[in-house]
Image (tube, rainbow, N blue to C red):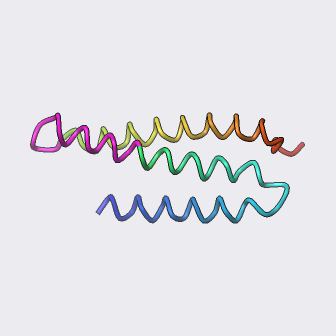
Amino acid sequence: MTLFILGKAWLFAVVAGLVFLYPKGSRFLSAHLLLGSTFGMVLSFIGLAIASWSLDAAGNWMPVAMAAGAVLGVFIGSRLAFKLNAALGWQTPK
């Protein structure tokens, strides 16, 4: 059930990121939505896989590992988005 919700939230963030690419004033948000959501989803699945392979069979730590991977992925994606925005000149409007 969680995977279906996560997939839909990721797809929504990707579509929103693509929509924010077009208005010039909100281009800086596009990189954050695209990179943050993608890295969050990928590391969430990696955390889930590691938890299912290495931890107890009951699966008590799977949601914790999934959430930790998602938070780490969003942080990494956001840091990369800051660097990408600086390289492209898409700074926050003043």
**Residue range (magenta):** 43-59
Query: Which quadrant of the structure image shows residue 53?
Result: top left
Task: Determine if the magenta segment contains residue 50.
Answer: yes
Q: Quadrant of the C terminus?
A: top right
Residue 53 appears left or right of 8: left
Q: Residue at x 45, y 65 (%)?
A: 8
- Front residue (pair 54, 61): 54
Residue 37 x/y as whole percent: 53, 50
Residue 6 x/y as whole percent: 41, 58
Residue 39 x/y as whole percent: 49, 44
Task: Determine if the magenta segment contains residue 54.
Answer: yes
| The furthest residue to the front | 87
Query: Which quadrant of the structure image shows residue 55?
Result: top left
Q: Quadrant of the N terminus?
A: bottom left
Q: Residue at x 40, y 42 (%)?
A: 43
Q: Is residue 17 above or below residue 82?
A: below
Residue 67 x/y as whole percent: 37, 42
Residue 88 appears left or right of 94: left
Residue 57 appears left or right of 63: left
